[in-house]
Amino acid sequence: MKYLSNLFAITLLFGFSACNSNAQTNSEANTQKAAVVEVIDFHNTHRCMTCQTIEDKTKAALQEKFPEAIAEGKLVFKTVNVDLEENYDIAADFEAAGTALFVHTRKNATSQKTDLTNFAFMNATSDNGKFETGLIEEVEKALQKL
C-alpha cells in the first residue's frame, strides 16, 4: 500500500512538472509575440473638444502616413475610456486618469512608453501641422525600434 502511495505521489509530481513546463513554454511564446507599436488615446466618458480633436487628428495622421504598418499589425491605434472598470488596469499602468496620449513600443519582453499628452494638448487645436508632424516623428522612431 505504501508503494502505491509513493507511486501515486511520484506520478502526481511528474504530472505537475509537465503542466508547469507547458506553462513556461506558453509564457515564453507570449513573450516572443510580434513586436508592435501602440498609439493609445486615453479619455474620459465626457470629452471636451480638444480631447476629441486629439483622437481625430491622431487617427487621421496614422492612417495617412502608416497604412502598411497598420495593415501588417506593426502599428495599432487604440482608444481607452479610463472611466470603464475593464480599463482600470491599463489606465493605472500608464498613470492615465483622463485624457492622455502615449506611443507604446513592445518588443519581446521590453516595453517603452512615450508620453505625448502635454505635446498633444499644446498643439492639437492649431492648424499649423505641428501636432501631426511631431506625432509622426515619434511613431517613426518607435517603428525603427522593432
Image (spheres, rainbow, N blue to C red):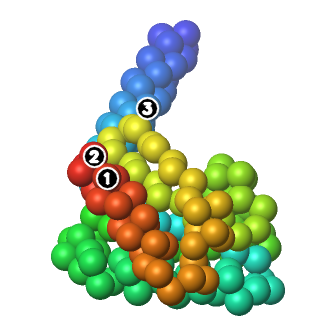
**Alpha carbon separation for disc pair 3 and 1:** 38 Å
Mark 3 or mark 2, which has the lower sequence index? 3
Q: Secondary structure at mark 3?
A: helix
Residue wearing tag 2: 145
Q: Quadrant of the N terminus?
A: top right
Q: Position of residue 40 (x, y in %)?
A: 53, 67
Query: Is 11 in front, or is 102?
Result: 102
Residue wearing tag 3: 20
Q: Are marks 1 and 2 in contact (CB under 8 Å)?
A: yes
Q: Is residue 98 visible?
A: yes
Q: Is residue 77 visible?
A: no
**Amino acid residing under circle 1:** Lys
- Give above or below for 64 relative to 83: below
State the residue at coordinates (35%, 61%): 137
Query: Is 115 in front, or is 70?
Result: 115
Q: Quadrant of residue 125?
A: bottom right
Q: Position of residue 53 (x, y in %)?
A: 60, 86
**Amino acid residing under circle 2:** Lys
Q: Residues within 10 Å of mark 3 (few under 14, many from 20)?
A: few
**Alpha carbon separation for disc pair 3 and 2:** 33 Å
Q: Quadrant of residue 49?
A: bottom right
Mark 3 or mark 1, which has the lower sequence index? 3
- In the rendered structure, the answer to whether residue 58 lies left or right of residue 41 reads left
**Amino acid residing under circle 3:** Asn
